[in-house]
C-alpha cells in the first residue's frame, strides 16, 4: 500500500471515530442513578437522575437554580441562561416546585458543594 493511501485511510478512520464518539456523547443513554449515590469521585462525570424540583429560583440574568430531590438525597441544579432559553421555560414547561424532572448532566463542585449542570437536551419533564 502506498504511503499516501495509508495516510488517507488513517485520516478517514480517525475522523469516523471522532464523529462516532461525538454522536454517542449526545445520544448515548445514561443509566439512571439515585441522587444519594452521587459523590465527589463523580465530579466531571455525566449522570442521569430524576426527582422533584424544590426551591426554584429564577435569577434576573436568566439563570435558573433549584434543588433536585429523589428521596435518597438532593443536589443543586444550575441551568445557565443559554440552556434555560433553549428549554423555553414558559407555560406548562416552566420549572416549578414539586415538578418531577429527569436530568442528564455533568456533576461539578462549587464552593465545596456538588451541583448538576444539565445541557438543554438533558432536561425532561416527567
Image (spheres, rainbow, N blue to C red):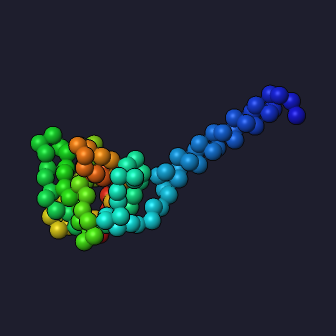
Coordinates of residue 71 in the picture (x, y in percent)? 25, 71
Residue 22, percent from left and from top: 53, 46
Task: Choose top left, top right, bottom left or bottom right for residue 11.
Answer: top right
Q: Residue at x 25, y 53 (%)?
A: 77
Q: Position of residue 19 (x, y in %)?
A: 58, 44
On the rendered image, what quadrant is the C terminus found in?
bottom left
Along the line of sight, the residue nearer the viewer: 116 or 103: 116
Image quarter (top left, top right, bottom left or bottom right) of the N terminus: top right
Name the one closer to the observer, 58 or 51.
51
User: Which residue is depicted at the point 80% across and 33% down?
Assistant: 6
Tell which of 43 and 116 is nearer to you.
43
Residue 119 shows in the view: no
Q: Farthest residue toward the bottom? A: 71
The vertical placement of 28 against 84, above or below, is: below
Q: Along the horizontal axis of the image, is 10 left or right of 121? A: right
- Residue at the spot x=40%, y=66% of the render? 32
Q: Is residue 41 visible?
A: yes
Q: Position of residue 21 (x, y in %)?
A: 56, 48
Amino acid at each position: 500500500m502506498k504511503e499516501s493511501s495509508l495516510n488517507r485511510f488513517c485520516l478517514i478512520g480517525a475522523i469516523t471515530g471522532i464523529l462516532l464518539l461525538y454522536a454517542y456523547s449526545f445520544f448515548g443513554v445514561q443509566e439512571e442513578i439515585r441522587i444519594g449515590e452521587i459523590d465527589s469521585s463523580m465530579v466531571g462525570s455525566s449522570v442521569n437522575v430524576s426527582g422533584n424540583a424544590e426551591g426554584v429560583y429564577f435569577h434576573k440574568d436568566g439563570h435558573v437554580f433549584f434543588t433536585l430531590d429523589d428521596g435518597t438525597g438532593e443536589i443543586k441544579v444550575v441551568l445557565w441562561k443559554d440552556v434555560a432559553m433553549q428549554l423555553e421555560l414558559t407555560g406548562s414547561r416552566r420549572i416549578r416546585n414539586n415538578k418531577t424532572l429527569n436530568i442528564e448532566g455533568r456533576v461539578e463542585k462549587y464552593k465545596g458543594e456538588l451541583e448538576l449542570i444539565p445541557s438543554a437536551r438533558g432536561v425532561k419533564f416527567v
